[in-house]
Amino acid sequence: MSSATNVQSSANLELHDEEDPLRPYFDPTDHGLDNSFRLTHFVELEAGGLGTLWQPETVVQDELPSAAPKLGIPHDCSVIPLRRGFGWLVQTTGLCYPIIDDPYVMGKIACTKVLNNLYAMGVSECENLTILLGVRSGWTEQERDVVLPLMVRGYKRCVAEAGARITGIRSIVNPWCILGGVATSVCQQDGFIEQGNAIAGDVLLLTKPLGTQLALDAYQSIWDAESRSKRIKLTITEEQVKQAHRQAINSMSRLNSVAARLMFKHNAHGATHIGELGLVGHAQHLANMQKQELTFYIYNLPLIGHMAALAKDNGEANDRQLLEGLAPELSGGLLICLPRKQAAAFCTEIKELDGHPAWIIGMVTKGNRTVRLVKRAQHIDVKDD
């Protein structure tokens, strides 16, 4: 594959009508690869993945022209007025490194992550996506020919679930494997929800449980000898680790489209997605954008099953971050500011429509654009049915 940008016709990207295969584990030998092949081995820690992110808006904001788009940096999406006043172009870009070894499921997770930015602004429909693909330069031809089609198939499956279409692939040879995309939607004048309209008295809702990173790390430790030697003994059973891992995969692969639609129905005052900055980090990002001076109090932490016990007893600093609201997530839930009177109805309806709950995790008060996690926040142990 050439290192030059490659645009592939959408005619070659039609999704075949086939049953979504169940892929709880990826066995490289099923595809003619060496048993030691791990997709996650092709990401150097310092190259990316989950962790604290540099905030480019601190540098770029001062360089924006006076005729800048209505919304852009530091919002989740760029919202640009269309010519002749016919609506808005809402667009976002997302990228991620492999965090699991199954290329198919990683494709689904990457697509879900890209769409999360649209959903955080109440935009539940996406017109098209362009896949962005960094092809690792160190792969053999066989590894490339196995991994890339599987990742794209998973990505296409998620696009189909979202009711969108793929209009092309742009790829480049890169030292690391990277997968992401550009998602675009066209909205009417009132077709999106601005993020800065929270008021005192609102409540904070979360649409997915936390703990994906810890669940993935714990799963890694039960089969990787090198990883086992670096971690202290797990305080939960191997079966509980596998349950948490499956739950994390299902959560990261699940779209927030239903929550986006309900944001309009229940008059949400703004939202953001939960990602690499963790719950508190993204809550602070949202608090900073408010037109009024407010403080977000968080008193509930919905956590993937068994992860609270693991984070409490394991003793490692990275694990304890989960209970401090600082652990990174990938393709997490939406954090939504919602009128108190409509919060219960939102939670009831999303459970009925999506099959998964949402939780009231905090409240909005007058303040100084800060986020406070109470000392004795309740840990809600969330397990899949």
Image (spheres, rainbow, N blue to C red):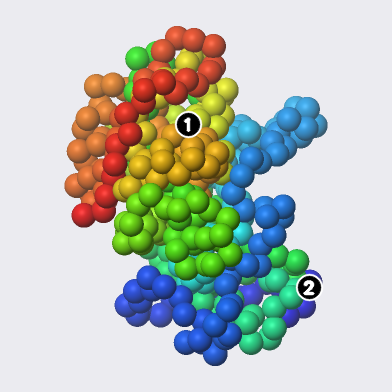
Residue drawn 32% across the image and 77% down it? 19
From the viewer's side, name the closer residue of 70 and 142: 142
- Coordinates of residue 211 in the picture (x, y in percent): 43, 45
- Coordinates of residue 69 in the picture (x, y in percent): 65, 35
Residue designated by label 1: 324
The amino acid on which the numbered mark 1 sits, given as a three-letter code, is Glu
From the viewer's side, name the closer residue of 230 and 282: 230
In this rendering, the answer to whether 156 lies above or below 90 is below
Image quadrant containing the N terminus = bottom right
Q: In the image, is 324 to the left or to the right of 277?
A: left
In this rendering, the answer to whether 203 lies above or below 357 is above
Query: Viewer-nearest of labels 1 and 2?
Result: 1
Q: Do we see residue 268 in this rendering? A: no
Residue 283: which disc? none
Residue designated by label 2: 3
Residue drawn 21% across the image and 32% down it? 345
Residue drawn 75% across the image and 67% down it? 174
Residue drawn 22% across the image and 45% down it? 351
In this rendering, the answer to whether 357 lies above or below 370 is below
- Coordinates of residue 355 in the picture (x, y in percent): 23, 51
Q: In the image, is 204 to the left or to the right of 137?
A: left
**Which element type, helix, strand or loop, lies under badge 1?**
helix
From the viewer's side, name the closer residue of 143 and 8: 143
- Coordinates of residue 279 in the picture (x, y in percent): 48, 35
From the viewer's side, name the closer residue of 341 and 301: 301
